[in-house]
Amino acid sequence: MTLQISPEKISEFTNYLALQERSTGTIQKYRRDLEKLRRFAGGEISDKATLIAFKEYLIRQGYADVSINSFLSAVNQYLKYMGFAAWQLRFLKIQRQTFRRAGKGLTTQEYQRLVEAARQQGNRRLALLVQAIAATGIRVSELRGITVEAARRGQAQIRMKGKTRQILLPRTLCNKLLSYCEKKRIYMGQIFITRTGRPLDRSNIWRMLKKLALTAKVKAKKVFPHNLRHMFAVAYYKRYKDVVRLADILGHSSIDTTRIYTARSGSEQQQIEELRLVC
């Protein structure tokens, strides 16, 4: 048997995912991942060995284990859809880290430089977008929930992965958003839109943030939407120490996912270990 992995088959699969009510972000990611597999293997795959070679290729390319498993998830879903479930690949085993790597997250000073750089560029929309993610912990795909109506209520309704949750918006953020909307004559609906009224998409936001990082003199590899979300989670946990509530705010179905955000840095963990040895 030969597995077809043509652009047409990938489109059929993504249409199937849409009918399964998978999120737009998930569908787009699966498409990108499968396109990478198609470029690696060509339009046809005759045996599982080619898929294993693709997995090994990802490892050699230096992708993080979590990213590789994300690729494999897309591939396995496609294999199941195409009737090749027997060819599904095993995920890499990842031991949960007890501490996070230092220097990976954004510092408060770096965050402030990003916001200030956007303001100095006259890009008020970008400055507010950075603050909106950092102040609420929402995903970049959930920015559509930040609407004029939500800013007036002080509460956004987020629909993601078949679930709906309410996110409280800080009063200061709401005031800034409403002031921006008044100036831009945005009277209803989504706030973070293009000049033509279309919602900003993920690729536009990534591109803007990378340019902003250069201006703000912050390492580009640290400036992406999820790191702003991570900064919110770390700040929230430090203040309230409530991992269950944090999981609800972030929209996690498992607290194990949330624990990634509550891990101490390596230096913090080392200090605790040293204290245990004092006698």
Image (cartoon, rainbow, N blue to C red):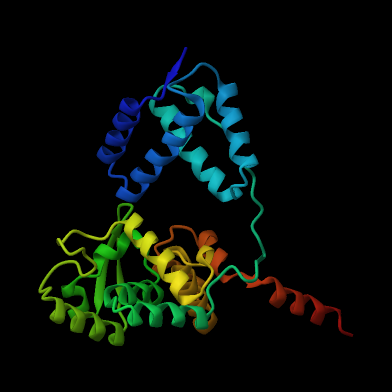
Where residue 196 sits in the image (x, y, percent)?
Answer: 15, 61
- Report whether residue 229 is seen: yes
Residue 45 position, x and y percent, is: 49, 20
Q: Residue furthest right?
A: 279
In the figure, 62 relative to 277: above or below? above
On the picture, is 23 further left or further right than 252?
left
Outermost residue to the top: 1
Q: Is residue 187 above or below residue 163?
A: below
Residue 168's place in the image compared with 194, above or below, is below
Of 73 and 162, which appears nearest the observer? 73
Q: Position of residue 53 (x, y in %)?
A: 60, 29
Residue 90 visible in the snapshot = no
Q: Is residue 108 left or right of residue 22?
A: right
Residue at 41% x, 25% y is 5
Q: Residue at x 39, y 24 (%)?
A: 82
Residue 55 vs residue 266: left or right? left
**In the picture, which quadrant includes the C terminus?**
bottom right
Which of 165 and 45 lies nearest the eye of the viewer? 45
Q: Can you tell which quarter of the image residue 28 is in?
A: top left
Q: Quadrant of residue 176?
A: bottom left
Q: How many marks?
A: 0
Name the spot of residue 122 as percent of width and height, x first: 29, 79
